[in-house]
Image (cartoon, helix red, strand yellow):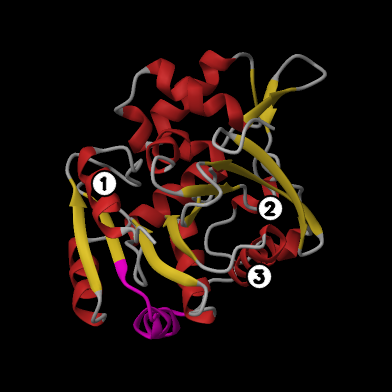
Amino acid sequence: MTSAFGVRDIFVEANGLRQHLIARGSASAPSVVLLHNLVGQARMFDRAATELAERFQVFALDFRGRGESAWGPHDEYTQSVYVSDVEAVREALGIQRFALVGTAMGGGVAMAYAAHHPERVTALVMNDIGPDVDGGGVSRISDRTDSTPTAFPDLKAVVNYYKEHFPAAARLSNQRVEDYARWNVRLSDNGLYVWKMDPAARHVGMGVPEQDELWRQYRSIKCPILVLRGEHSDILSKETAAKMGREHPDAQVVEVTGAAHPPLLTEPDALSALNQFLPAE
């Protein structure tokens, strides 16, 4: 662990599991918690978290079964369990109120958490996710999940996999993709790179409420909401994003130019929106 202002790995016992976070920024600054997507982990936020740490204490969480967090029972990779994990982690960290930024699946968890714990959340950012999702994007992710290789001969093969199957990665340099992808794999005893992620956690939509309930959750949120939509997203449609702007009295919608699903939060549009939206105190 480095100084209070540097990058720190934090492990807490929460909800019956050892859970991992990466912290940045001053402990005296307002807190922001970042929640990743279905097959991501905390390192996906490295660049965005470094930017935000100039003003905030930033925590990026590895959901159970991902990154450096422990694997859980296979029937507990559900939205309701992820929500209870966030609350247990918050309690372990001792933070009382914080802004919540969720990407894709993490945005759905963030929305549910904000609906169930309104006293805790100062502001909510939903990154390329809404109460409705496009069927085409869900099918793409499901097809990718079903065909995911279990092992790779080297990191170059891992990078190629990301660039071929993840729209957001396709626009990045090989080096930048490797900087992220290497945190998702480990070198096995037989010399192959295998996923750190629990295969059971890859299933799309486990335990997600019905659409009407999701809209009810969304409308019930008490804090301001920022909806980010990638210009080329196949998950969050323009129509759903616009409806989210209409259906909540304190919501704003920003389209991230040039971004696919999901925006990385390092795009100029995304960073500008985050810095203007997130509360300074």
- Give the residue at x 44% y 49%: 56
Q: Position of residue 29 (x, y in %)?
A: 47, 52
Q: Disc 3 designates what residue?
A: 84
Q: Quadrant of the C terminus?
A: bottom left
Check the image and report above or below for 216 versus 139. below
Looking at the rendered structure, the secondary structure element under dot 1 is helix
CA gap between label 2 and label 1 equals 27 Å
- Residue 147 seen in render: no
Check the image and report above or below for 48 versus 116. above
Main SS category, magenta section: helix
**Other residues around mark 3 within 10 Å, as few (<14) / some (14–19) / many (≥20):** some
Q: Is residue 237 magenta?
A: no
Q: Position of residue 6 (x, y in %)?
A: 56, 33
Going by the numbered disc 2, the residue's amino acid type is Arg
User: Which one is earlier in the sequence, the residue at label 3 or at label 2?
Assistant: 2
- Residue 127 seen in render: yes
What residue span does the magenta drawing correspond to? 210-225
Going by the numbered disc 3, the residue's amino acid type is Ser
Image check: 149 left or right of 239?
right
User: Which one is earlier in the sequence, the residue at label 3 or at label 1?
Assistant: 3
- Mark nearest the camera among 3 and 2 is 3
- Give the residue at x 41% y 56%: 138
Q: Nearer the viewer, residue 39 or 50?
A: 50
CA gap between label 3 and label 2 equals 11 Å
Q: Position of residue 223 (x, y in %)?
A: 37, 75
Q: Which mark is residue 270?
A: 1
